[in-house]
Amino acid sequence: MLRPTIRSLLFAAAGVSVLLALAGGGLVAAQPVPPTAPPQEPAPNAAPKAPDESAPPISVPTPAPIPVPPISEKDVAPAPPPIAETPKAPAAPEHRTRYDVAVLQALDKVTAESLRFEAAVGRPVRYKNLVFTVKACERSAPDEPVEDSIAYLTIDSQPRAAPGRPALAPRQTYKGWMYASSPSLHPLEHPVYAAWLITCRAAAPVNPPAR
């Protein structure tokens, strides 16, 4: 009876020794691994997630300014000298042509009588109670924008002397330039008479040339 029991114990002890040897050698019985789920792909046309509006804004620090070294006079190139332009000589203005006779028009406002007459330069001419003395008469130069006749004259008011009485002293009523194209520019201001310039012309020769 004892032999089978001892044999059984020996077999049991031998099995325990084998298990301990396997455990010490690092052999571990394989265990089944649970299956892993395949990775899920994102659904097509999925809208991106909106940012969280409740999150605080990100503050970006301001970069420090970069110091710029001062520029010395040696680094600055001198300015180029100005280009000398040759001044153009202004064109000499053309002179007006002067004439020795002025053609004038006078009007008596009371009788409505009008008279056109000529007055030679430097020679007084009487029309009723007015005495006209032409000092100069000229026409505009070709380079002027308006073709005109201009006369410088004086007009004196002097009634005719009554028989047996001395003549009254003349009283100047006008002095200045008259313009044929603009009679109202510098007119004669008189309660009875009006006068204006018509044109300037050269005096006709006394003896016409023989043919």
Image: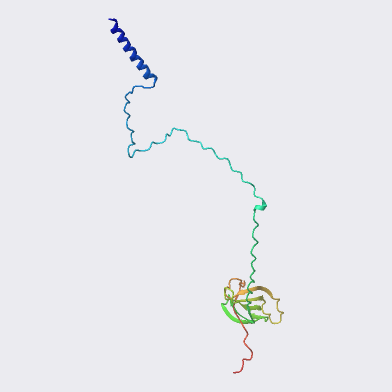
Q: Quadrant of residue 148?
A: bottom right
Q: Is residue 22 left or right of residue 141?
A: left
Residue at point 62%, 74% (across, down): 178
Indicate the position of residue 174 as horizontal and vertical percent values: 65, 73
Q: Quadrant of residue 101?
A: bottom right
Which residue is the extreme one toward the bottom?
A: 211
Does 201 sit above or below residue 171?
below
Residue at point 34%, 14% (across, down): 14
Quarter placement of the C terminus: bottom right
Indicate the position of residue 70 as horizontal and vertical percent values: 64, 47
Does 144 sit above or below residue 17?
below
Quarter placement of the N terminus: top left
Q: Nearer the viewer, residue 62 or 88?
A: 62
Indicate the position of residue 177 as horizontal and vertical percent values: 63, 74
Indicate the position of residue 160 as horizontal and vertical percent values: 67, 79
Which residue is the extreme one toward the top?
A: 1
Which residue is the extreme one toward the front?
A: 3
Residue at point 57%, 79% (across, down): 114
Q: Quadrant of residue 142?
A: bottom right
Q: Is residue 11 left or right of residue 184?
A: left
Q: Is residue 155 left or right of residue 30?
A: right
What color scheme is it? rainbow
Q: Nearer the viewer, residue 110 or 124?
A: 124
Q: Nearer the viewer, residue 195 or 93?
A: 93
Does 85 sit above or below residue 113?
above
Residue at point 65%, 73% (across, down): 176
